[in-house]
Image (cartoon, grey):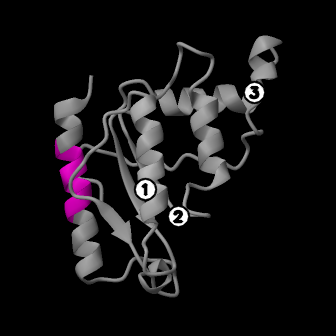
Amino acid sequence: MAPEGFEFKLISLNNLPVYNQDFDDNHEVPEAYTVFSKEMSAVDGVIFITPEYNRSVPGVLKNAIDVGSRPYGKSIWNAKPAAIFSNSPGNLSAFGANHHLHQSLVFLNMPTMQQPEVYLPKVHELFDESGALKDGSTKEFLQKAVDAYITWLKKNAL
């Protein structure tokens, strides 16, 4: 879905220890934090793709946001253009997670694309047996959303 000249990079959150302010205070920052921060600092923008757990983002995503925002004054998120694509197995399409994440991004000073909004219900029905996104209106919509983000990113990147 990336247009020519752009590359998407999936950055894993799996190895990040839970954020603890004591790591910063005691100068004992885990190596995984440093690796994550370097990876995120190298990208021009972020499309957050998130499910919803209990009307919010998954803990692993919130943890990554916290890790990247530290130490204070050196946030990797500052002024990095973002978009939010939320999904759920049900009909609500992660509305709560989308808006909760947006609230966090405002605090982090991440300009966030407002339109189109991306809420994907019944996400388990959108992929075939091999994990590929099925052709159809959702795939077309997602391509338009990605294209809109790229256009918006070009206008808002530092």
Q: The residue under label 2 is which amino acid type?
A: Pro
Residue range corresponding to the magenta coloring: 144-151
Q: What element carries label 3?
A: helix
Query: Is 150 a magenta residue?
Result: yes
Q: The residue under label 1 is which amino acid type?
A: Asn
Give the class, few, some or many, for how many residues have Cα within 10 Å of label 3's Cα (few <14, many ≥20).
few
- Give 141 or 133, whichever is nearer the viewer: 141
- Give 128 or 114, whichever is nearer the viewer: 114
First reached walking from the N terminus: tag 2 or tag 3: 3
For disc 2, the marked residue is: 51
Q: In this rendering, is residue 69 above or below 152?
A: above
Percent across and percent down for residue 111 are 31, 34
Label 2 – label 1 distance at C-alpha:
9 Å
Seen at 43% across and 37% down, the residue is 105
Dividing the picture into quarters, in which one does residue 147 lie? bottom left
Q: Is residue 106 visible?
A: yes
In this rendering, would 17 be left or right of 39?
right
For disc 1, the marked residue is: 98
Q: Is residue 4 visible?
A: no
Q: Is mark 1 on a helix, strand or loop?
A: helix
For disc 3, the marked residue is: 31
Give the class, few, some or many, for how many residues have Cα within 10 Å of label 2's Cα (few <14, many ≥20).
many
